[in-house]
Image (cartoon, rainbow, N blue to C red):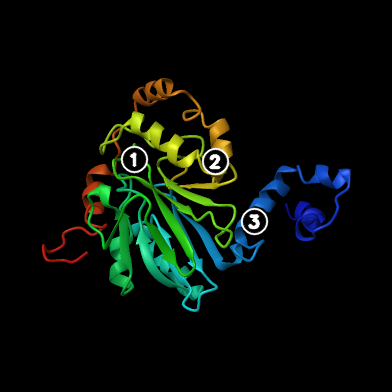
């Protein structure tokens, strides 16, 4: 891996006219991957504002995402889909990077793990918990479609993507030139890499999920990076274009998709009876009635 990067990194870092041999080199899968990473992590002045980290909790296969505007004096930051078991790890990283955590956000009420938003509120004064109004969960801030959540000069647009649950939303970075490019979509369980979330509980609907994905996610630019809430096969990131072409469920017509989803025969989620009640109160259990979340 190091050898390949050393050999080709000048093709990525120096604007120049490429020979036919060099052009072919850029088709190498590793080089394409590095190009995507570079474009997200700071290839332009807009992207250089963004500090981005993808974190993983292995027991529930959950991704947590850290975003911060490091061009702002306060370096404000947010976490998407934090997990209770990794709160201390996440806060250690935030402190090491000199960030100020402002928001702890969820894409939906999870059934496979307890969210870390409640614990984060007890450990970091002033942090606000955030979730969609349609979720019915407790939080400090309730989001509706079209709302924006800002950290410094970076913002996330809220798109309603119900179907896995009734309250699912996707957070998408802005389309303007001063926002990180390519755009990033944090899809929760609406779109997984080469898959999607199940639709057989928590108000799920395969018909609704299909419409949500095709109207709210697949209408984004094809180079939009897709970051899901979970992955079980070792994938980390995809794009809208990839999923439109290769997702084995969402590339089908709606009736075929509904048939696929109704015949998954999945086991009852082992954490659902603990996770859902806890997540409906921001991830904290056995709270006194007067507790203000």
Q: Classify residue 33 as left or right of residue 76.
A: right
For disc 3, the neighbor class at 10 Å (few under 14, some 14 to 19, many from 20) is some
**As drawn, 16 above or below 251:** below
For disc 2, the neighbor class at 10 Å (few under 14, some 14 to 19, many from 20) is many
Query: Viewer-proximal residue, 247 or 44?
Result: 44
- Between the C-alphas of marks 2 and 3, the distance is 16 Å
| Residue 249 can be seen in this image | yes
Name the residue beneath numbered marker 2: 240
Query: Viewer-proximal residue, 127 or 62?
Result: 127
Name the residue beneath numbered marker 1: 162
Residue reaching furthest to the left: 289
Name the residue beneath numbered marker 3: 39
Q: Position of residue 255 (x, y in %)?
A: 40, 20
> Which secondary structure, mark 3?
helix
Q: Position of residue 155 (x, y in %)?
A: 46, 61
Q: Position of residue 111 (x, y in %)?
A: 30, 44
- Between the C-alphas of marks 2 and 1, the distance is 18 Å
- First in sequence: mark 2 vs mark 3: 3
> Which secondary structure, mark 1?
loop
| The label number, if any, that marks residue 122 in the structure image | none
- First in sequence: mark 1 vs mark 3: 3
């Amino acid at each position: 891996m190091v050898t390949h990067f050393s050999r080709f990194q000048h093709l990525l870092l120096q604007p120049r006219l490429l020979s036919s041999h060099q052009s072919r080199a850029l088709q190498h899968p590793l080089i394409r991957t590095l190009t995507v990473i570079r474009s997200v992590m700071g290839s332009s002045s807009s992207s250089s504002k963004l500090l981005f980290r993808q974190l993983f909790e292995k027991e529930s296969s959950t991704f947590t995402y850290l975003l911060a505007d490091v061009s702002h004096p306060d370096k404000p930051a947010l976490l998407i889909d934090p997990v209770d078991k990794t709160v201390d790890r996440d806060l250690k990283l935030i402190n090491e990077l000199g960030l100020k955590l402002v928001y702890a956000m969820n894409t939906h009420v999870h059934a496979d793990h307890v969210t870390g938003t409640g614990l984060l509120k007890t450990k970091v004064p002033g942090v606000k918990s955030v979730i969609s109004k349609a979720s019915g969960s407790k939080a400090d801030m309730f989001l509706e479609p079209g709302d924006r959540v800002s950290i410094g000069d970076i913002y996330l647009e809220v798109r309603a993507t119900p179907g896995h649950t009734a309250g699912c939303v996707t957070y998408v970075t802005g389309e303007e030139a001063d926002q990180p490019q390519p755009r990033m979509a944090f899809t929760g369980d609406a779109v997984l890499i080469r898959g999607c979330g199940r639709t057989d509980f928590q108000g799920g609907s395969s018909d609704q999920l299909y419409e949500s994905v095709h109207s709210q996610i697949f209408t984004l630019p094809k180079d939009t990076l897709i970051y899901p809430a979970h992955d079980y096969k070792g994938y980390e990131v995809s794009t809208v274009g990839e999923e439109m072409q290769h997702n084995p469920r969402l590339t089908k017509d709606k009736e075929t998709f509904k048939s696929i989803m109704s015949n998954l025969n999945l086991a009852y989620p082992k954490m659902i009876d603990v996770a859902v009640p806890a997540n409906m109160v921001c991830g904290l259990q056995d709270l006194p009635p007067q507790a203000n979340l």
